[in-house]
Image (cartoon, rainbow, N blue to C red):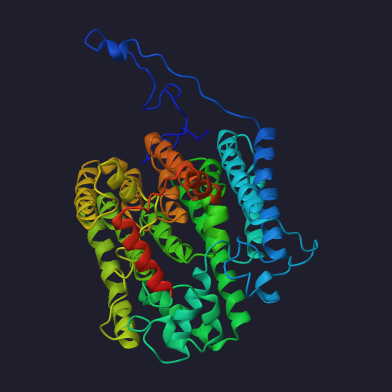
Amino acid sequence: MFDEKTSPQGPPALATGAAAAGSPEAAIPLGPLAPARERFRIPSMRIELGARAGGVALGSIVLGALAVVVFASAAPSSLVPHSGRLFPTWEAGPLGGLFGHPSLAPHALTALYSALLVVMTIAYGAALLAARSVSRRAVLGFVLAVSLIMLASPPLQLTDLFNYIGYARLGGLHALNPYSHVIDNESWDPVFRFTTWHHLSSPYGPLFTAFSYPLAWLPLPLAYWTLKLAMVASGLAFIWLVWRCATLLELDPRPAVLFVAASPLYVFFALGGFHNDFLMLVPSTAAIALLLGHRDKAAGVSLAVAVSIKFSAIVLLPFLLLAARPPARRRRLLAGLALAAVPLVALSIALFGLTPPNLSGQHGVVTGFSVPNLAGLALGLGGSTTGLLRLINVLLVALVLMLMRRPREWIAGAGWATLALVASVAWLMPWYLVWVLPLAALGRSAALRRATLAFTVFLVLTFIPETSVLIGRYGLNPMSTATGQAALKLQEKLQK
């Protein structure tokens, strides 16, 4: 499925067994002293699909995206938060009412949307199996088609896009520091009715917050569409950078791009929600591309930009330092990081004073199917307790230190660390896994790709609406413990 050329990162093959001769997974005889398990290992068969199957899979994802957008745009539904009480035509978009105003009973919509996401996940798997058969033109056409379709959609399932505008208007229009004030402080503003986190100060980085300020001076519909365009354009730039990194690693870019762009988490959750993660992923992926091109100082600058948008990008730093060899390259990387940090810190102080982003504001807020909550339930601890989260953070640091002992696999190491970071978050959202996708696609670890795909399936199955309905029928509720109920009360307080 993935190209198996030898590269500094090795093959990003998604094959589920031994690779062809010459690859690290080939069963090479080791002589009379080789262990029996090495001498008699039987290579497993590679499963691949042809170009026609790949075209059907990609076409199915495009049609699925179009169906969701048409339905979400047509009439108020649970797909678009707050649409039952407020759904202006500028939010519905150009497809609003184009095919009439179809509507379904809530339970029917829940079942249908859940089934579609499962089908799209299966189509994603088929697309990966056919990745080396489809043409480059088909891959690029798919990426562009999905991006344009989702651009026409109202934000799906969550209101983060309006929260971004709400924080921007706090500072840019009402002269209130979004790091020390909350959206409830502008309850008279038109954006307030579209927002969710009314009592949570902004958790986003200073560069993103500063970038969003000019939106405050635009009419709300224009700010909404400007931000949507910025997110989709950033998504396209992110995919191009994945392609570029694959080329620099002398890999076939088609499997790497489809590993990211055909994922239902990318299409329906990241793109469909217009999340600002793309604004972080562009400079963080650019840092990898720049380092691969031996532009070390620029890589440091790019990483600093990513961190100033979302602090989670910092997990990439130790692995970039690991890859920057000899030491002179490491010094250039750190010089670029410091060079960018100075004006970024100055910008933050000038606009927001010494008040940092509210990174701990959602501490104590939990999603029922987050890994810490499920682990806490399995261990009889009552869910995602503070003590368990502290232990997980310690284990995360230990994992990063262990991964740094393998310098030749630095991209895969960064992928494992980022996957562990996502799994450690108590407030787990499906699109967080998009942080891992490019690292898994470009790294040399087939195990990382399998783990990422398994986590993709887990997130789809646990976040589709029908899952909550199904487990509720059996009296199951992962938030029924004292910790879970406290988390729900905190969430209600922050959104009240």
Quadrant for the C terminus in the image:
bottom left
Residue at horizontal 67%, vertical 76%? 88
Residue 327 appears in the figure: yes
Tell me where residue 231 sits by quadrant: bottom right
Q: Give the side of residue 378 with respect to residue 288, left or right.
A: left
Residue closest to the eye, 126 or 193:
193
Q: Give the side of residue 177 with respect to residue 463, left or right.
A: left
Residue at horizontal 61%, vertical 44%? 115
User: Residue 180's x, y, as percent?
Assistant: 32, 83
User: Residue 448's x, y, as percent?
Assistant: 38, 39
User: Residue 36's x, y, as percent?
Assistant: 27, 10
Residue 204 appears in the figure: no
Furthest residue toward top: 32
Total number of numbered discs in the rendering: 0
Q: Give the side of residue 371 with respect to residue 114, left or right.
A: left
User: Residue 475's x, y, as percent?
Assistant: 44, 45
Residue closest to the eye, 413 or 93:
93
Where is 164 relative to 175, above or below? Answer: above
Residue at horizontal 76%, vertical 59%? 102
Residue closest to the eye, 159 or 261:
159
Tell me where residue 385 sits by quadrant: bottom left
